[in-house]
Image (tube, rainbow, N blue to C red):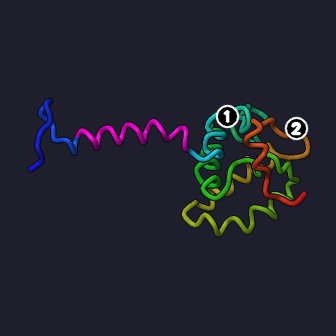
Amino acid sequence: MAKPNDGGYPRAAVLGAVLVVMIAALGGVLAPPRARAQSDVDISKIFWCKDGENGGQTADQCAEVRDLILQNCTACHTFVPIVKAQKTEQEWDATLGPHRSRLPDLSDDDYAKIRAYLVPHFNLQHPKPELPPELEKLGTGLPS
């Protein structure tokens, strides 16, 4: 049986609690640069949703699809290649086709909504969003 300290708690419990607090505190410091950089970004400015400018989606539908993108696409890569690509509709179709098999749990309807979001938002008619330098350094992973 563990010997209690002066406060009546076993030393292992006290040390365990201290360790948990230290790990949590260091999480922000030790997080990978990609995770820290993404958390400092106002996603709603980059993945914007404005009625009448969302390819037929309302602002609420657009926000739901933005969440689908951030929950699914960023499981494999940052959102940087998505927002910096600025593709035509045909180029988005060429990109999204091979990606479909990477998200087998996503419904075809939700995948179609992602396409419906990307095509009107990240194309040649809209300027590339400005990102913090830490994210810009990550690049798009795409050929120049």
Q: In the image, 26: left or right of 18?
A: right
Query: Residue 16 lies in magenta, yes or no?
Result: yes
Counting from the top left corner in percent of width and height, residue 23 is at 42, 42
Screen quadrant of the C terminus: bottom right
Can you identify the residue that label 1 sits on?
41
Q: Please state if 141 lies on the left or on the right of 6 as rendered.
A: right
Q: Main secondary structure of the magenta part?
A: helix
Dots 2, 1 in contact, CB < 8 A: no
Q: Nearer the viewer, residue 63 or 109?
A: 63
Residue 65 position, x and y percent, is 64, 45
Q: Amino acid at mark 2?
A: Pro
Q: What amino acid type is highlighted by mark number 1?
A: Val
Circle 1 sits in a helix, a strand or a loop, which is it? loop
Q: Nearer the viewer, residue 105 or 53?
A: 105
First to last magenta residue range: 14-30
Mark 1 nearby-residue class (10 Å; few <14, some 14–19, many ≥20): few
* Front-lying residue, 57 or 5: 5
Q: Which of the two residues, 15 or 76, is positioned nearer the viewer here?
A: 15
Q: Residues within 10 Å of mark 2 (few under 14, many from 20)?
A: few
Q: Which mark is residue 94?
A: none
Tell me the quarter of the picture where residue 57 sits: top right
In this rendering, the answer to whether 96 lies above or below 138 is below
Q: Nearer the viewer, mark 2 or mark 1?
A: 1
**First of labels 2, 1 by sequence position:** 1
Q: Residue at x 85, y 40 (%)?
A: 128
Residue 95, relative to residue 2: is it above or below? below
Assign a secondary structure to mark 2.
loop
Residue closest to the far left: 1
- Kindly identify which residue carries mark 2: 127
